Amino acid sequence: MVRLVGAELKKFAAQRSLFMAAVFIVPAFATLIKILMQVVVFRRVGQSNLGSSVDLVAEASRSFGLSGNTLAHLFFALAVASIFVVDYRFSTWRHFVPRRSRSQLWLAKFLAACCCLILSLLLVTFSDLFVTMLVMAVDGTVLTPLAGLDQLFLLFSVAVLELLALVSVTALLTVLFRSSMAAVLIAFLLTLGSVLVQAYLGAGQDLWWLPSIAANDLRILVTSSASSGAVTPLAALLAWMIVPGVLGLVLFNRQELATE
């Protein structure tokens, strides 16, 4: 399985423009915004937003929230769709299907997509911390002792679950339509629709089933150190990860790939 995942990552990396756009644009854009905010906004008013001391764990925790950003989901969906569609596009399925089971091939693509999205999220976090440390060096800001690493891990886990839900939905759409364009657009519209519904109706209990609401609820529970109430949002995120994933795998196992 490790070799299959590595092969999928190599095939994706060979599509350089798609690989760069899907994996590196989000970290680059987030870093640019961070720099502009520090240089243009906070420097112009003559003060930094960091205060007299900085908690790097808290800074990293905030950066994990980008996993639910609507615009970031567009590029994340592009990464997933590009990995799943490449063998449809170049009609290479017939070379792999006789050698490996379809479940292994699908799972390898799924894991490769997860690796790319997690890499992009980690790059966002590291670049954010790098800019923060540069500002600290200029301002002489004091670094507080590292604490709350368990909370950092939990917030990272929530971000990964949210990304896995996006991977499952986009993978299902790509297998269904055999087109990356259709999968990316529909996945983005679903994310955008979720945001619009939330903005119109509010983040009430009736919307607990939306992945963005479930992820936000889990983040609130983690940051508030609450001991209960995590079952419903966690179940919602797991359902968004498992149900589309199983449907995509079943559909892929039933597809005619002899000529593809």
Image: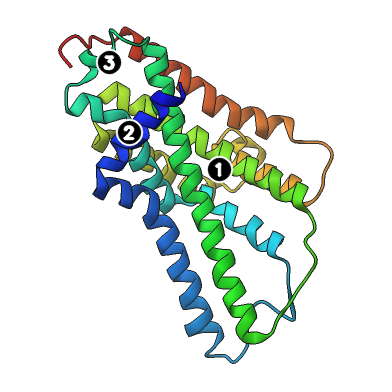
Task: Return the x and y of residue 221 as percentages of the image width and height.
Answer: 75, 45
Point out which mark residue 212 bears: 1
**Residue 70 visible in the picture:** yes
**Residue 82 visible in the picture:** no
**Amino acid bearing label 1:** Ser
Point out which mark residue 83 bears: 2
User: Which residue is rendered at x = 66% and y = 32% of the image?
Assistant: 234
**For residue 205, which quarter of the picture?**
top right
Q: Quadrant of the C terminus?
A: top left
Is residue 144 or residue 191 the one in the foreground? Answer: 144
Task: Return the x and y of residue 112 as percentages of the image width and height.
Answer: 42, 33
- CB contact under 8 Å: marks 2 and 3: no
Task: Return the x and y of residue 160 as percentages of the image width and height.
Answer: 57, 40
User: Which residue is rendered at x = 79% and y = 51% of the image?
Assistant: 224
Task: Return the x and y of residue 29 as percentages of the image width and height.
Answer: 41, 63
Q: Which residue is mark 3?
A: 96
Element type where label 1 sits in the image: helix
Cα separation, mark 2 vs mark 1, equals 24 Å
Q: Is residue 201 left or right of residue 96?
A: right
